[in-house]
């Protein structure tokens, strides 16, 4: 779903039609559909879903489990697990967990699309400053701690954002 931006999709709400379009865009091409310039042996994308903070089962919270099942039904490998430190969403705990437990290791990041919601969006942005990713989808992203002590503890907002690195890596 590209609404004419060159930087990507930024939305807090989308219609069923827009979601269907996004899911179709994420669908991996079958070998017969691959352009001549792309090898059929090219690695498939993995989508990891990084929730907002708050705790509880991510499979039952918001739209995370629903999206994971929609993507799996379309043959996409999905990483979605309950996060460590779910209330504070500390960067020092979440980024290693995203890399190792959701993406399958640092080498897999280049084939990983990170869908981050709220605190998960902040984590996705910081991850893309440090690592090359196949893509990033941000849902309800924000760039400050909003004056909230819990958000401040996460560590994401203690330094300037590196927008150029994010853009280059995702």
Image (cartoon, rainbow, N blue to C red):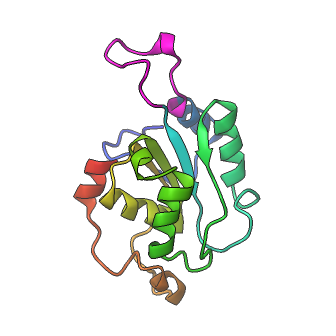
Q: Quadrant of residue 50?
A: bottom right
Can you give x and y, in whole percent of width and height, for residue 34 in the image? 43, 16
Q: Is residue 140 visible?
A: no
* Residue 28 covered by magenta stretch: yes
* Residue 125 covered by magenta stretch: no
Q: Is residue 74 above or below residue 19?
A: above
Q: Residue at x 73, y 56 (%)?
A: 59
Q: Is residue 91 visible?
A: yes
Q: Residue at x 49, y 10 (%)?
A: 32
Nearer-the-camera pick, 47 or 16: 47
Can you give x and y, in whole percent of width and height, for residue 31 in the image? 49, 14
Left or right of 33: which side holds 128? left
> In the orientation shown, which residue stands out farthest toward the left?
164
Q: Quadrant of residue 102?
A: bottom right
Can you give x and y, in whole percent of width and height, for residue 72 in the image? 67, 37
Q: Is residue 34 above or below residue 9?
A: above
Q: Residue at x 55, y 50 (%)?
A: 48
Can you give x and y, in whole percent of width and height, for residue 11 in the image? 50, 52
Nearer-the-camera pick, 16 or 123: 123
Nearer-the-camera pick, 21 or 80: 80
Report the number of discs: 0
> In the orientation shown, which residue stands out farthest toward the right?
60
Q: Residue at x 71, y 41 (%)?
A: 69
Left or right of 69: which side holds 91? left
What stretch of residues is rendered in magenta? 25-43
Nearer-the-camera pick, 141 or 76: 76
Q: Quadrant of residue 159?
A: bottom left
């Amino acid at each position: 779903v590209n609404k004419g931006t060159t930087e990507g999709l930024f939305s807090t709400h989308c219609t069923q039609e827009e979601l269907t379009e996004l899911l179709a865009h994420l669908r991996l091409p079958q070998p017969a559909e691959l352009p001549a310039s792309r090898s059929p042996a090219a690695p498939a994308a993995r989508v990891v879903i990084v929730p907002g903070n708050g705790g509880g089962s991510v499979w039952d919270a918001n739209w995370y489990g629903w999206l994971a099942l929609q993507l799996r039904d379309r043959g996409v490998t999905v990483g979605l697990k309950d996060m460590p430190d779910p209330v504070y969403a500390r960067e020092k705990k979440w980024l290693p967990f995203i890399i190792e437990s959701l993406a399958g290791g640092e080498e897999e990041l280049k084939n990983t699309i990170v869908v981050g919601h709220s605190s998960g969006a902040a984590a996705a942005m910081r991850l893309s400053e440090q690592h090359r990713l196949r893509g990033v989808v941000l849902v309800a992203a924000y760039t400050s701690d909003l004056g909230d002590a819990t958000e401040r503890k996460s560590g994401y907002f203690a330094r300037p954002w590196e927008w150029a690195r994010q853009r280059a890596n995702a």
